[in-house]
Image (cartoon, grey):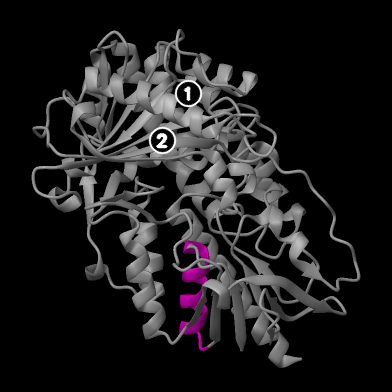
Amino acid sequence: MKAAIIGGGLGGMVSALLLARAGAEVTIYERKEQLGGRLAFEKGDRYRIDRGPTIVLLPEMLRSIAREAGIPDDEYELLRCDPMYRFHYPDGRVLTKWTDTDRMAEELDTISASESRAFRRYMRDMEPVFQQGKAAFLERPFLQLRSFFSWHNMKLLAKLRVYMNMRQMAESYFGDKRVIDAFSLQSLYIGGLPLGSPSLYTFIPYAEHAFGIWYLKGGYASFVNILERALVRENVTVCKGEHGAVRQITTENGAVTGLLLEDGTRHNCETVIYNGDFPFLSSMLHGITEPVKKRQFKPSSGCILVYVGVNKRWEAGAERTTHQFMLPDSFTDSLRTIAASGNFPNKEEPLPAYYIFNPCEMDEAAAPPGETVLYFLIPAPIPVVPYSTFDWSKVGNELAERVLADAEARLFPGLTESIEWKKIRTPQDGANEGWFMGGSFGIAPTWSQSGAFRPQFAPYKVKGLYSVGASIHPGGGVPIVMQGAKMLANHVIEEWATWKAI
């Protein structure tokens, strides 16, 4: 069988490998000159650093699916981050997150014994719920809505207290606001806010402690080269740039018939997999007899990203880690204000929360000898594009200056005067690249866009049409997108067998 994949992001590449290994003839069409999608490097002068994802979660899920796709463990190296990361507060207080349960409990003992006991109870409660939830929600699709509302799933959702958001779930265990932050802000990893993401996503902070946080040596984006080599081994055809830009998906009598490229070339095929931000898929369909039902989607959060190359390296250890979060006095109030106002705090107001990625702490080769690369992520208002009236260049530069000065004063002495290279990305840049409304993670992980309510890999009643990626169930995050690709590939292979039988 033949399959055409529109978009060479992570979901598209993994789908291609799994289908090719099942004997299919697969072609990827990518309008850019490189594969990887959001998994890419920012480069400048002699520096490079991950553009997007930096934190590796659920390492065994990543390894297992990579093996199925023909990528052995020895082609890449995962390094465990321990401590996982640190939270830094304006008054100088620091809260460290450790993988080991006992050590984390000891850390929380410095706040209060009740928080330590609550953490142990949290881990006990979450273990069985995570294992059941993984099988029920992460490893199966919901092509019919009713399959989501089984008696087993309803009992499980009750255990997860789905009437709560992630922040409320953390509050049901912990009392100190710093600890509540530490067990709810992980919604930011997938483009959601703790107050707007259902408790279903509490599996993320639990999984950090159960399975650790990891770093892919060489940078997460180096995984793209590994995938590309595998594509060559599996004889997957890749069309890039002007030869890979798709204008339309053609259909006839409710079934896919092929693709029309921007250069006017037509390619016939009966299976098309769309690997872009899902809200754009309906506009690419041509010739459908049954109109696609329009749906309003909420975008994931955007962010301003500041990448710097620095001509010095700080001593390892101290309070610096590979991952760290710089938080205001009230993290929740800060996010709520940005989300409600659709604006950033002015220069007279406290800085919003921001995240720092410091790969040289674990990987000396991440920068030239004696130098450092860093990236700073600042959550942006949502929705961001096209409705905002920001001068994103001005806003980005102003925030970058404030964040760099703050990081210099608190963690990286001499930072600003040592910068050799700097680049700033805003939600507008994401929108220009085809990210839905500038959101950095596809559509948001709200309750109405999760589980069975999130777009599925067979989203429309069009035979041979599928979709994969962060906006498709089970959602965002590198291992989860890979899991979505695995479910899709298994389904397509089963359908092909049915077609042959007919």
Above-or-below relation of 224 to 150: below
Of the numbered discs in the image, which one, if any, rests on residue 170? Answer: 1
Rate crowding at label 2 as few (under 14), some (14 to 19) or many (20 or more) other CA atoms within 10 Å. Answer: many
Of the numbered discs in the image, which one, if any, rests on residue 205? Answer: 2
Q: Secondary structure at mark 1?
A: helix
- Which comes sooner in the sequence, label 1 or label 2? 1
The image shows residue 113 at horizontal and vertical percentages of 28, 12
Q: Quadrant of the N terminus?
A: bottom right
For this rendering, which residue is in front, 152 or 149?
149
The image shows residue 25 at horizontal and vertical percentages of 54, 88
Residue in the image at 46% along x and 31% along y? 396
Residue range (magenta): 10-23
Q: Secondary structure at mark 2?
A: helix
Name the image quarter holding residue 287: bottom right
Q: Are marks 1 and 2 in contact (CB under 8 Å)?
A: yes
Three-letter residue code for mark 1: Ala
The image shows residue 403 at horizontal and vertical percentages of 35, 24
